[in-house]
Image: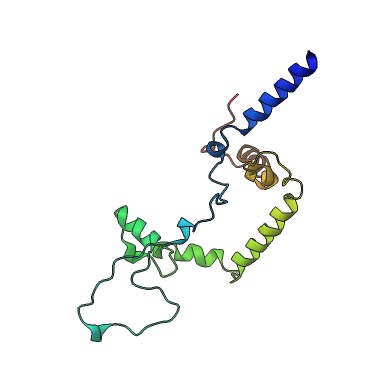
C-alpha cells in the first residue's frame, strides 16, 4: 500500500511539474520556441519622402545613417517635448560633452563591445557546465549572475564606513 501511494504521489508531482511551463518563462529567456523568423530583427523605417530639389541633395556617404533609419534616442527626446537637434552625432546631449570627455580621458577601446561579449560568452559557457541537465527548462539568469550582482544595501554601508560620508538619499534598512 505504501509503495503504490508513493508511486501515485511521485506521478502526480511529475505531472504537476510539467504544468504552466510556457507562462512561467521570464523575459530574460530569449530563446525562440519556433523555427520562424525573429520578429525583433526586422526594423521598421520611416516613410520615404521626395526632396524639394534633387540638385540640393548631399553626396552619398557609405556607412553613414540613412534619412529613413530610425533614431530612437532623438525620437524619444522629441516625443517627450525636447529638442532632438541638441543631441550630438554620438547621441550624447551637448551639455554632457564635458562629462563624456572626462570619463574617456584615459582612452576608449574601440572594440570594447566585442571584448565584453566574448568575456560574457566565456563566463556563461563556464557557468553552464552543470546547468544544462534540467528536467524543466528555467530562467537561469539570477543563478548564473548571482556573484556579479550588486547588493545596494551592503555597498551603501561599506561606502558609509570607509568614507564617513552620510548618504541621506539612501534609506536605512527596514527593521
Q: Quadrant of residue 58?
A: bottom left
Residue at 76%, 18% (x, y): give it.
Answer: 4
Residue 31 position, x and y percent, is: 57, 51
Residue 128 position, x and y percent, is: 72, 50
Residue reaching furthest top?
A: 1
Residue at 57%, 69% (x, y): give it.
Answer: 105
Residue reaching furthest left?
A: 52
Check the image and report above or below for 166 versus 85: above
* The N terminus lies in quadrant: top right
Check the image and report above or below for 119 versus 8: below
Residue at 68%, 42% (x, y): give it.
Answer: 143
Residue situated in front as seen by the camera: 35 or 124: 35
Residue situated in front as seen by the camera: 138 or 136: 136
Residue 145 seen anywhere in this rendered image of the structure: yes
Q: Quadrant of residue 173?
A: top right
Viewed as shown, does residue 163 lie left or right of 86? Answer: right
Residue situated in front as seen by the camera: 78 or 167: 78
Residue 136 position, x and y percent, is: 66, 39
* The C terminus lies in quadrant: top right
Residue 44 position, x and y percent, is: 37, 62
Amino acid at each position: 500500500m505504501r509503495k503504490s501511494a508513493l508511486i501515485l504521489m511521485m506521478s502526480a508531482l511529475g505531472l504537476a511539474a510539467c504544468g504552466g511551463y510556457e507562462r512561467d518563462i521570464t523575459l530574460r529567456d530569449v530563446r525562440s520556441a519556433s523555427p520562424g523568423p525573429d520578429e525583433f530583427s526586422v526594423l521598421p523605417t520611416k516613410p520615404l519622402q521626395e526632396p524639394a530639389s534633387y540638385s540640393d541633395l548631399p553626396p552619398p556617404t557609405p556607412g553613414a545613417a540613412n534619412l529613413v533609419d530610425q533614431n530612437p534616442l532623438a525620437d524619444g527626446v522629441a516625443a517627450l517635448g525636447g529638442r532632438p537637434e541638441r543631441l550630438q552625432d554620438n547621441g550624447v546631449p551637448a551639455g554632457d560633452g564635458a562629462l563624456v570627455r572626462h570619463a574617456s580621458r584615459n582612452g576608449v577601446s574601440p572594440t570594447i563591445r566585442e571584448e565584453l561579449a566574448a568575456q560574457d560568452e566565456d563566463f556563461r559557457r563556464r557557468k553552464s557546465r552543470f546547468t544544462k541537465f534540467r528536467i524543466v527548462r528555467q530562467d537561469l539568469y539570477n543563478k548564473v549572475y548571482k556573484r556579479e550582482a550588486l547588493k545596494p544595501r551592503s555597498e551603501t554601508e561599506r561606502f558609509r564606513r570607509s568614507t564617513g560620508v552620510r548618504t541621506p538619499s539612501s534609506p536605512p534598512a527596514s527593521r
